[in-house]
Amino acid sequence: NDFCCAYVCHFDICMQRRKELVEHPFGTIKWYDGAHYFLCRGKEKVSAEIALSFLTYNLRRAINILGVGALVAHFNRRKLENRGCGLL
């Protein structure tokens, strides 16, 4: 019985940590996009829809952290670096 109590207590701690670390970005993305459900049907289309949502989330975070000017400068610098490599 003590093992069960210890397991349940550990499980509760792990679930609380998961909620703090993992579920926050999903809730933020849903709030930003007003996405209470997926608009598309099918695994491939839903995967593309969620990928676009994460892309916009990451861009918003980068803009908030670095600022628009620094982000544009970074992309321009990367573009110049990759010109000789056949990329872009």
Image (cartoon, rainbow, N blue to C red):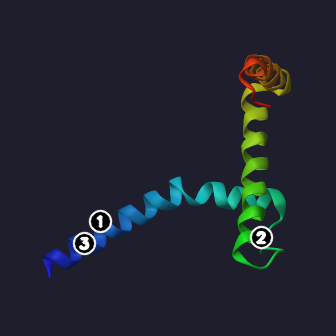
| Residue 26, above or below 76 | below
CA gap between label 1 and label 3 equals 5 Å
Q: Judge depth for marks 2 and 1 and give the one in front.
A: 2
Label number found at residue 45:
2
Q: CA distance from mark 3 to mark 2?
A: 39 Å
CB-based contact (under 8 Å), mark 2 and mark 1: no
Q: Which residue is mark 3?
A: 7
CA neighbours of label 2 inside 10 A, class few (<14), some (14 to 19), many (20+): few
Give the mark, 2 or 1, whose residue is nearer the N terminus. Answer: 1
Q: Please say if the residues under marks 1 and 3 sit with CB atoms less than 8 Å apart.
A: yes
Q: Which residue is mark 1?
A: 10
What's the residue at 74%, 22% (across, down)?
A: 82
Give whichever of 7, 46 is nearer the camera.
Answer: 46
Question: Which numbered marker is on residue 76?
Answer: none
| Closer to us: 87 or 31 | 87
* Number of other residues with Cα within 10 Å of mark 1, as a class: few under 14, some 14 to 19, many 20 or more: few
Q: Residues within 10 Å of mark 3 (few under 14, many from 20)?
A: few
Residue in the picture at 78% in, 72% down: 36
Q: Secondary structure at mark 3?
A: helix
